[in-house]
Structure formats: C-alpha cells, structure tokens
Image (spheres, rainbow, N blue to C red):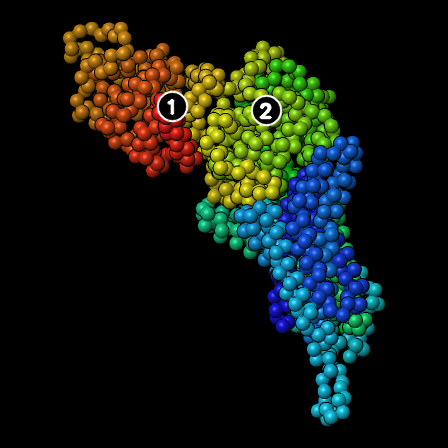
Amino acid sequence: MNVLIYFLFALSGFAGLIYEGSWARYLKLFLGHSSYGQVLTLCIYMGGLAIGSFVAGKMVEKVRRPLLGYAAVELAIGIGGVAYHPLYNLLTGFFFDSEWVAGLGFTGAEIAKIVLATGSTLPIAIAVGMTFPFIAAGLMRKSGAEVSLPMLYFTNSFGSAIGILFTSYMLIPVLGNHVTLCVAASINFLLAAIFGYIGFTTSPNHEDDEDELPGDAAEGVSVAREPLNEDYAAEHKLAMPPKSTWFWIAGITGLTSFVYEIVWIRLLSLLMGSSSHSFDQMLSAFILGLAIGSAVSGKLLKKDSLVVLSMAQILMAFFALCTLYFHKPFWEMMNEANQIFNPTNDGYVCWSLFKYALSVLWMVPTSFFAGMTLPLITIILTRAFKSEAPIGKVYGWNTVGSILGSAGGGLLLLPLLQLKGALVLAAVLDFAIGFALLVVYRKRFRYSVAFYVICAFMVLPSIFVNFDPHLITSGAFRAYKNLHPDEKIIVRDGKTATISFHESNVHYYIKTNGKADASLGKDRSRPIEGDELTQAATAFMPMAVKDKPYDAAMVGFGSGMGAHYLLADPLLKDFDCVEIEQEMMDLAKGFYPWNSRGYDDPRIHIYIDDAQTFFLTNRRKYDLMISVPSNPWVSGVASLFSHEFYTKMRRYIKPGGLWVQWIQTYEFNDQLFLNILKALDVAFPYVSLYKAPEEPDIIIIASDEPVYQKAISRFSTDSTLVKEFERIHRDPEFFGEQNFLFTSKMVQSLMDGVAPNSIFTPMVDNKAEEARFVHSQAHIVQVFDSCEVCWPEYLDSAENALRRPARVKQMMQNAVDPYKQLALNAYLDDVQAKLDSARGFTHSEPDSVSTLSAMPALPAAAESSPLWVKFRVDYIEWIRGVPLEARDTNEVYVKVRTLVNEGAFPSSFVDEFNIMECARTKDYQTAARLVADFYEKYEMKAMDEFFLRNALLIAMLAGESELANAIYVDAIKEHESFFPVEKFLIEREIVKLRRAALKRQVSR
C-alpha cells in the first residue's frame, strides 16, 4: 500500500508543477515580463505552500483520518484548476477595462496587478501546500516508519521534475494553457477519489499498533512496537540546538536555495538561451536534485543527524561556489555543441537533451544537498516533539525563506550585488550554518585543524574568481563563437535581464542575456547598415505616412537609435518611450552621441515600466505606436505578437493611427510568421508588410485605414530630414514603397485555417526556439520579392497599381553593370551584323512588335554554341533587373526584340520572350495561350523559378485554372526553388480560381 501512496504522491507533484508552469505563463503575460512573472509565481506558489503547511500542521493532529483530509484537499485543488482560466480572464479583463483601475496611476495599478494575480492563484497554492502534512501524517500513522518522510519528499519532487518538462514540451504546445490546467485538475480529481476510498476503508490508527506478545496472548496483553529508527543523538546524549533554531535553519535554507535558483536561471539563460523551454529545464533540474537528496537522506536516519545536516549545508555552499569556479567548461561545451548537433529537427531533440544534461550538471550537486536538509530537519523535530506537528511548521518556514529568496534574489540582490555577489552571499549563509553547528555542538570539529583548512579551501577562492564577462555574454547557444573576442565589454545584471555593451574594432552592440539586440557601425562616413538599418526603417517607414503633426509612443528603448531617428521628424510633437529594464537605458548611452535625441530631445519622455500598465494608467491615445521587441523565441516576447496584445494596444491608438512592429525572417519559419500575421489581421482591418531594405527583417504597419506612404516626398523637401538622410548616407526614398511586400488581405487564402498566435495557445513561444536552432527562415519575403510578374498583381491589382511605380523607379535607379551591358550589346550587334550580311540588306527596326517570329529561327544546333549559352544566361540575369514597365525603352531589350522578330534566336528563347512581351503589355489571354503552347513543346520542369512563377501567374491572371494547375503539378510542386509557403498559396489560389470559374458557368 505504501508503494501505491508514494506513486500517487509523485503524481500529485506532477500536477503541482503543471500548475506552477502554467501559472508562470499566465502571470508573465499579466505582469508584462517573464522575469517578473517567474518571481511572482515563485512567491505565490511558495507562499501558498507555506500557508498551507502551517494550516495543515495545526489541523493534522486533530484529524483522525489524514488521508481522507488529503483527498479533500486534492478535490479542492482540482476545482481551483478548472476555475483558474475563466477567473484569470475575469480579473484581467476587469483590470484592463476598468476606469477605476486606470485612475490609480502607475504604482496603484502595479499593486492592483499583484493583488489580482495573488487573489487568483494563492488559494490553489495554499491547497497544494496542505497536501504534504496530511499525507505525511497519514503514512506515518499507517506505517510508523520515519523513512516515509524522505520517500515522500523524493517521490513528490521527482514527479514535479517530470511534470514541468511534460508541461513545457507536450501539454502546452499541443493543448494550450487552459486545457493543460484541466489535465492537472483531472489528476487531482483522480487522486481525490483514490485517497477518499483509502481514507474510508482503512483504519485511522497504526496498522500494527498493538502486536500481541506470544506469552501474553491468552490475557490479551499488548505492547507498542519499537520505533524502526533510533535517534542517534538522543542515544549518545549529544548536544543539539534549541528546537526553535531548526525552524530558522529551515527558513534560511529555503532562502539560499532560491537565491541559487534565481542566480542560476539568469546564468543558464546566458548559457542556454532565455527561452521558455530553457527555464522549464532549469527548474526541472533543480527539483530533480532536491528529489535525489530527499531519497538519500532517508538512508542516513541512523547517523548523527546534526552532523549529516551540517555537512549537507557546507557541501551545498561549496558546490554552489563551484558553479563560479568551473563555469568556463560549461560555455565551452555549449560552444562545441554547435559543431556536434546538426541544425535539424532530430538535432534539436538531441540538443534539448544536452541542455537538460548541462542543467543537471550545473544544479543537481547543490540542490542534492539542499534536498537533504528539509527531511533531516523535519525528522529531528518530529523526534524532539514526538508528534507530527512540526511537519507543517518546518515546511512553512522553509517556504517563507523560499519566498524571500525568490523575490529578494531577483529584484534586490541581482541588481545590487550582481551575479557573483548574490551567489557568494547565499553560499556564505549556508556555509556559516553548517560550520557553526559543527563547531558549537560537536567538539571533534571544533579542534580539528584539517576541518578549518578544508573549509578555507572551499570558500576563499570565491574572493579571487569572477564570471568571465566575455564568456557568459558570448551567446554560445546560438552559434559557434570566439569565446574571447578582442573587444571591450560592460556587463550589468538588471531586474529583468543581464545587459552587456560591447565595443569591437568596427562597431558597437548591445546584448540582452547574451543575444545581440542592436548594433551600430563605427564608420559614420558609410551608409548605415545592419541592425541600425532596421531600427531606422521602423521610424522612417511610418514617418512617410504622416503628413500632419502627430504624437507617438514606443515600446522598448533598446539602443535608442529608433527613437533617435523618429525624433528627427519636425512633425513629431510628443514622444513617450516605455522601457522595462533600467540597465538597458544606462548601457545604451554607449551609442551616444549617435542616439543623442533619445536622451536629450525635450519631446521624449522615458518611463521604466511595463508597457501594458503604462498605457492603461497613462490614459492617452497616440497617432503612432512602435513596438520593437526582441526575437520571439525569447521567453515572454512571443506574447507581444499575440492577438490579445494587439487588441489591447489598439485601444491606445487614435483613429487613423498606426501600429508598427518589426519581425525577423531568420531563425523563424513561415508557419509561425502566419500565426503572427493572423493575430494582426484579427486586431487590425489593414495590415501592410514591408521588407527592411538590405536586411532579413519585415516592418509591419497596421491601422484602421489603408496604409500608404503619401508623405514620403517631404523627406526630400524638409531641410531637417534632408540633413538626416545626408548623415546616414541614404537616399530619401530608400525606405519608400519600393519595399512593399503585401497586405494581409492579399494572403487571406494562406491564413484560412491558421490560428492566430495567442497568449493562451502560445504557438510561437513553444516553437520559436526550435526554429532558431534549425536556422530555418520565413521565406514569404522571397515569394513576393523575386518576380517579374508578381503575386500582388494577381492578388490585388488595384493595390499593386498604387505601390508598383515606386518599385519600378527604384529598379531603374539600381546601378547597372557597364561591362555586362557592353558585352550584351556587342553580342547583339555582332548577331545583327551577321544577319544583315547573310540576308544582303541593311537593318531597319520593324514598325510593329506585333509580328511574332517573322523570320525562321536559328537552327537547333546554334543553341549549344558556347557564345549563345553565355549570352542567354547573362541576358536573362540582366533583363530581370529591368521592370516590365520600362523594358520597351531599354537599349538591350529593344535590340533583342528586333532580333527575335527577325528570327535570329533559337525557338525556345523566342517562345519565352514572346510570353513575357505579352505579359509586359498585360495581354494575359495571349500570354496564357503562348504558355500553353510552351507547355506542350518543352519540358517545363527544366525551367527556372522565375519563368515558372511567371507562367503560373500569367495563367491565373488569364483565369486559366487548369493550365495553372498543370504547371503547378508538373513543374512547381517538386521544384526545390519553390518554398512550401508558396506551394501552399498556389494550391489555395487554384482552388479559388476553379470555384470562381464554376460560379461563372452556373450564372450563365
């Protein structure tokens, strides 16, 4: 029976960590940052455990059937689990919708947040805290064995370690937050039913309470059985501290353990990346160590418990300091892992296991000894009090210390003492407890020189060893790195993240938890590039839409370059910038004076705050809001790409105002991109996407009105803006409509059936880390940017007609390779001369281009001529840089057209040319017929991506769905140059085209 109870209590721990993992996700959404959410979750969770333990500790002695009480608690937890999601929605809805909350101001709103978060979560946490005292008392009464306590700690903690991983990798990605909570609740209901049955059907007393002695059987005399384990200290009459001292030790041990956890989570975020999966792996590893330590402590009950506990405290401190002494090998292992694990889906699984192994190696040696302390203190006090009453108090004091450690460690010690200081302080506290207990209460240690030498050897190196700043901020989790680059670096550990500022020979850059967020080239005589280009685009692209004075807000200061460029606009009246991390503001001063307006311009107002709370309490609306978050794989960031977040932010945008956000296409994929685009489409009626020029990023501009850069001309006329573009060495129209890709309305067929990214079904948060690891890309940019006949022409010809002139102008202004132009002209002139000579007349251009293939084509043998092959390749590459609208004025094109009409080229080239000539004049019906002829005459699958896309879109523009389908099935479907997202778009659009054709037939 005991084995079954251990297994079921492990299941209870499994459910408990499902709650903690889910609550962390809920609360970081509500509080606005993952670090705050994790700290508050730990505080509420551990606080609930403390209160529940104190309450249950008082109740347990008065309850005849503790296992029945345990069943009632599990039932209450299950009910709370089912009710949590709707209660969360109700309370957060009240917070964001209430005028009363909005009138509280920032401090009042933050207090209201904490109260609401605590009110929704604490009652369930209290119930979870009541489980251990009840089941411990029930099992001890049933078995009479003290060993049940360590085994209960072990099984519950082991179940918890598995539960958080299962939640992170299986439940939430597949089921979402709400259903995951329901799964945990169903486990609680199952446990309630089983323990209810056990509680009702078994005796409330010890099963072997009275063992009859053989000699007294007739008289029915009975004696109590001896305890299974003798108290070594009492037996040998060894000195022990006062009973109250043990409660203080339990509290300090809880405090130091959670300071370790907070420090290590920050350090391992730098080592493994700050994704949600990484956080969950760290927590699981920490709990696993506690579980193993609890199990081992049960084997030491016959030893001197004070010595065992003291040694555990000392060794816990030593192994905590070892993470300082030996942190370098961990970064080197992570760096080498980039060379070992292939960037594939299978490689990601292996890499995830490797990350977990690193977490175990880092945390378990310390948490192992931390896991021994609580069972040992509990046993010491149950022996001293000769009752189960101390169980709840010990558990409660330990969790009170845990609350102080998690809150104080994250919000106070890290910013004040930095990583090393906080770690060493916690280790010294643990070391001091163990050292003092041995020296004061065990004489053999008091006079042992070797003991003092060993202790000094353990602690003193911490004075001289530091975390290598180059190493820990290297970002080795992303790619193979030079772990000791020749650069200057400043590192600061803030409340929410570790920020580092780097200066290399050629540029400055700033990192958050080892991930570079912004960079700036030192050579200011060159055109701006890299990250600075994307930051400039987030300012100039929406600025080009505005032709009247406006006010703006920005979520995230970052390097300050985006704010600096936006403040270059004379039309900007007022600018609020909200940054959650003060250290980011401080270290971004390293970019000064190039970001000087972000600090000095009187129009900007900086607020260190959570964005949602700021905008709620600020109670104003803006003409322009810009959000510049980090990459979506970073924990908590994906919520800034959710439809719930967009819906809330839209409340603070004036009619006709703009919402602007950037998103990278690298380390991402098209499915996740569509999840985000669908979230935007749900929140805003008009969403336009632009490529950041020369960068693998997309700038999204959303509004309740159509978005068009109607005011970009002022970049060339306003003297202030003209000077700004001169300073950055870019053309005033560099960020113009030529960068337009598509609107959300154009790709509705792609988004049909796609779920919007949601805070409750966090698809992006769950999958973005894998996309980062496999180095996948969102290829949708190439789909809309690599074309002659382009998708926007088919998807929305009116929208395309509005934007296309800017693209044509930009293409015409692109630099021309004079040598290639000279070579093409020379070849064409030579062909023309030979043709004229052979035919015996002087060349004159035909009056009309409508004559197709007027003369016989060259013999087929000429197609294999090396000169012809080179010309054809060079010409195709050349002409695709010339827009269709401008080809009839292009010298090379005109010569080719003349020679085509005179039959100077092979028939395959002539047929291809004539197709595009009809497309140039938008005669898609004729072009489609020529495509059909081409399809019959040649092997379509041998053609390149450009031609196949042209042929397909021509067929679709002509309404020829069957021709389009034939081209797709025979040539495009298996073509490696076409990405899955485009193939999916083609399939959807062919279906729509067929339906439209069928509808027309029916209407006739």
Q: Which mark is residue 630?
A: none
Residue lying at 74% horizontally and 28% vertically, measured from the top left: 619
- What residue would you read off at disc 2? 703
Q: Where is residue 993 shown, x and y percent of the image?
A: 38, 28
On screen, 830 above or below 610? above
In the image, 410 versus 987, the foreground residue is 987
Q: Which mark is residue 1003?
A: 1
Residue lying at 31% horizontally and 22% vertically, measured from the top left: 928
Residue lying at 48% horizontally and 19% vertically, measured from the top left: 799
Distance between the alpha carbons at the discs numbered 2 and 1? 37 Å
Q: Residues within 10 Å of mark 1 (few under 14, many from 20)?
A: few
Reading the chain from its start, which is encountered first: label 2 or label 1?
2
In the image, 757 versus 200, the foreground residue is 200
Quadrant, the C terminus: top left
Q: Is residue 390 left or right of residue 725?
A: right
Q: Where is residue 320 shown, x and y percent of the image?
A: 67, 56
Q: Amino acid at mark 1?
A: Ser
Residue lying at 69% horizontally and 24% vertically, measured from the top left: 621
Q: Is residue 148 left or right of residue 905?
A: right
Q: Can you see residue 426?
A: no
Q: Where is residue 105 shown, x and y percent of the image?
A: 78, 33
Q: Quadrant of residue 229?
A: bottom right
In the image, 506 versus 668, the foreground residue is 668
Q: Residues within 10 Å of mark 2 (few under 14, many from 20)?
A: many
On screen, 793 above or below 47? above
Quadrant, the N terminus: bottom right
Q: Secondary structure at mark 1?
A: helix
On screen, 581 above or below 877? below
2 or 1: mark nearer the eye = 1
